[in-house]
Image (cartoon, coloured by chain):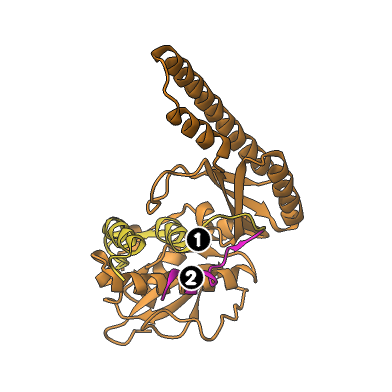
Chain colours: A yellow, B orange
Amino acid sequence: VSTEQVSAATSGQVLLPGGTGDSSLVDLLDRVIDRGVVIQGDLVLSVAGIDLVHVGLQLVLKGVEEGDVW
Amino acid sequence: VGEVDGTATYLFGIVRADALPHAAQDLQLPGAGPIRGLEVGPVRAVVCDVDPGAFAALQDPSADDLELLATAAYAHDALLADLAQQGPVLPLRLGTVVADDDTLRRVLAGHAPTLVSELDRLDGHAEWAVTVHLLEDPSDTAASEADADEALTGRDYLQRRRKALDLRDERWRTQEAVAGAVHARLAALAVDDEVVGSRPLEDGAPPLLHGVYLVADDRWPELERTVDELRAAHPSASIEVSGPWPPYHFTAVELDADDLASP
C-alpha cells in the first residue's frame, strides 16, 4: 500500500486544484488518531498507548520519506 | 448477548437510531468481521467484531504496521464518510475497541442525551480543512544570488543586509495578514472553527495556516466562491481546501466508561 494508492480513498476531496504535494496519509492519520469521540475507562481495550503510536509513527513516516524503509 | 470468545467490538461511529446506514459491503478493517449496527435507545453504534490484539503491534509500529494502520485508517474514514452522506455521525477515534457489545451498550446508554444533542448540532454540517502555504518569491532568491557574486565593501554589505532583513520583516507581516484574512473569511461562513496549531504527525515547518471549519451543507457554494476570491486576492499564497470530512475536529466528546462500570 503506497500513499499514492490509498490517498484517493480519503473522504475529504480536494475542492479546487492548487495544492502542492500529497501529504494525505499523514493528514488522515492526524485526523483519525488525534480526534473524534473518545471513550475513557478500563473497559476500553482500544489501541493502548496512542502516544506511543505517535512517537513510533513519526519515526516510521520519516523513514518512508527518506526512502530507507521501503 | 455474549460475544464469541476471543473477539471484541470495534466502534467506528455513532448515528441516530432511526438511521439505517447501508455501508459499502467491501469495507472492512483488516482481519475484522462485517460491519453491523447496534441500536442503543436513541442512537445506533456502527461496529464490527475484531480480534482484541489486532492493533497491539501499533504500540511500537514498524513499516509493516504502518501499512496495517494506513489500511485501518482509510477503512475507518471511508465508512464514516459513507455514514456522513446519509445523516449526522459522531466519528470515534481510530482504534476504539471495547470488550463486547454489552459494554458498549452500557456506555452509550449512559451518555445517550449527550450523543443525541451532538448529533443534532452536527446535522446538516460537514468539516472542511484549509491549509495556506506561502509560495516562494523568486525575486528574493535572485537578489541574494546577485549579492553573493559581487565583491562588496563592508558598508555596502551592511546596507544590503539591512535591506534584506527589512524585506523579510515585511514579508512576515504580509504572511500574518494573509493567514488572518483567510481565516476570518472562512470562519465567518462556518458555525464553528479551529486553527490547528500543530498536528502530531506533521513533519517540518507548519503551514502559514491550518484551519478546520464546520460549514452548513447549503453553504458549500459560498465556501467555494470565497476560496476563489481568496486565491485571487492572495496570489502569493497557495490555498488548499479539502472536504467534506466527517466532523473529526468538532466532536470533542469524552465518554467515561468507568462511571457506568458497576453491574
Q: Where is residue A28 in the image (x, y as percent from the top left)?
A: 47, 62
Q: Where is residue A26 in the image (x, y as percent from the top left)?
A: 43, 60
Q: Where is residue B32 in the image (x, y as percent from the top left)?
A: 38, 83
For the residue carrying disc 1, how many other residues have a C-alpha within 10 Å: few (<14), some (14-19), or many (20+)? few
Q: Which element type, helix, strand or loop, lies under badge 2?
A: helix
What's under tag 1, amino acid-wise? Asp
What range is drawn magenta here? A1-15
Letter of the chain that mark 1 sits on in the rendering: A
Measured in 3D between alpha carbons, the distance from the residue under mark 2 to the one under mark 1, in whole angstroms, is 8 Å
Contact between labelled residues 1 and 2, with CB atoms less than 8 Å apart? yes
Asked if residue B128 lies in the magenta stretch, the reply is no
What's under tag 2, amino acid-wise? Glu
Disc 1 target residue: A22
Tell me which numbered mark, 2 or 1, is placed earlier along the sequence: 2
For the residue carrying disc 2, how many other residues have a C-alpha within 10 Å: few (<14), some (14-19), or many (20+)? few
Disc 2 target residue: A4
Q: Where is residue B55 in the image (x, y as percent from the top left)?
A: 30, 72
